[in-house]
């Protein structure tokens, strides 16, 4: 195992048709998938990819994401995604992401908060287990986006239910976090579905397993801000807050 980790890692993305919605904009779920892949490519060569960590009985899971969206990448556009590990605060690990167009303009800047868990019982770990494998520098470089925080829904109304399917499940045995970004749009009132997102926060609160029924609620917080959340019979599984333009 090598302890050499590049300060940052960049991938080039040409936006494909399967990445986009009906308005030719990159879906937020695709944004999350590419970010997940860039992080894996960043840590993998140092022996810290998911397979290597699993061999040590540990895994990273996303817990919160906040992104400021200046503009979503468009169909057939070639863009770059740069990611870097920022720092660790106790059991919380923070990774930054920056998307740019061909002219170098920032499109999306965001921060993902991760937790370290045991692969056997999904128990939350302190984080020392990872640091013992490869201490990372305490980077001070950030982005123009605040860390993800807490938010509450007020006046939520029932929006329907969703049954977690086999295709939703990833190798960790629960719904992959990228799927929640699609669910957020699916349960949003139709008047809002075609709007351009400007700011989004996702809170991955608990596992959704195959066969679970998610009870979804929606709350209009402000004229341009809407929240979507879902619960299983074990409690909250995810919550999202999104600020929209052009609505």
Image: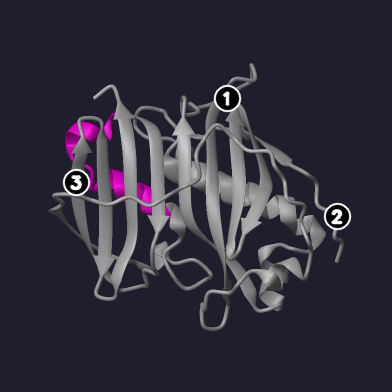
Instruction: Report whether residue 77 is seen.
Output: no
Q: In the image, is residue 205 above or below residue 154?
A: below
Quadrant where the C terminus lies? Answer: top left
Residue extending farthest top: 103
Looking at marks 3 and 2 on the same chain, the residue that comes earlier in the sequence is marked by: 2
The CA distance from mark 3 to mark 2 is 46 Å
Q: In the image, 51: left or right of 190?
A: right
Q: In the image, 142: left or right of 184?
A: right
Q: In the image, 97: left or right of 164?
A: right
Q: Which residue is mark 2?
A: 4
Question: Which residue is drawn at the image coordinates 48% and 27% (left, top)?
Answer: 75
SS type, badge 2: loop
Residue 119 lies within the magenta run: no
Between 55 and 237, the one nearer to me in the picture: 237
Looking at marks 3 and 1 on the same chain, the residue that comes earlier in the sequence is marked by: 1
Question: Which residue is drawn at the image coordinates 27% and 55% (left, top)?
Answer: 229
x, y percent for residue 25: 42, 30
Q: Which residue is mark 1?
A: 106
- The colour scheme used here is one colour
Looking at the rendering, which quadrant does residue 100 occupy?
Answer: top right
SS type, badge 3: strand
Residue 186 lies within the magenta run: yes
Q: Which residues are magenta?
A: 179-195
Q: In the image, is residue 189 above or below residue 212?
A: above
Question: What label sits on residue 219 in the rendered view?
Answer: 3
x, y percent for residue 166: 39, 68
SS type, badge 1: strand
x, y percent for residue 243: 32, 34
């Amino acid at each position: 195992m090598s302890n050499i980790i590049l300060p940052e890692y960049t991938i080039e993305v040409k936006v494909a048709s399967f990445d986009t919605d009906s308005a030719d904009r990159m879906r937020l779920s695709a944004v999350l998938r590419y970010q997940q892949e860039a992080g894996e490519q960043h840590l993998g060569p140092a022996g810290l990819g998911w397979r290597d960590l699993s061999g040590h009985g540990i895994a990273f899971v996303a817990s919160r994401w906040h992104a400021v969206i200046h503009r979503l990448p468009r169909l057939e556009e070639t863009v770059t995604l740069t990611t870097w590990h920022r720092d660790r605060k106790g059991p919380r690990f923070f990774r930054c992401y920056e998307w740019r167009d061909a002219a170098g303009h920032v499109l999306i800047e965001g921060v993902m908060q991760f937790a370290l868990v045991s692969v056997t019982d999904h128990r939350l770990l302190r984080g020392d287990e990872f640091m013992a494998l490869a201490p990372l520098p305490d980077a001070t470089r950030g982005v123009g986006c605040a860390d993800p925080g807490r938010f509450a829904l007020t006046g939520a109304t029932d929006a329907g239910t969703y049954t977690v399917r086999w295709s939703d499940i990833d190798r960790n045995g629960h719904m992959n976090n990228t799927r929640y970004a699609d669910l957020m749009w699916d349960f949003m009132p139709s008047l809002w579905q075609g709007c351009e997102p400007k700011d989004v926060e996702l809170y991955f609160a608990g596992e959704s397993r195959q066969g679970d029924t998610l009870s979804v609620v929606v709350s209009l917080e402000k004229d341009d801000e809407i929240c979507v959340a879902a619960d299983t019979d074990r409690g909250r599984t995810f919550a999202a807050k999104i600020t929209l333009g052009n609505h």
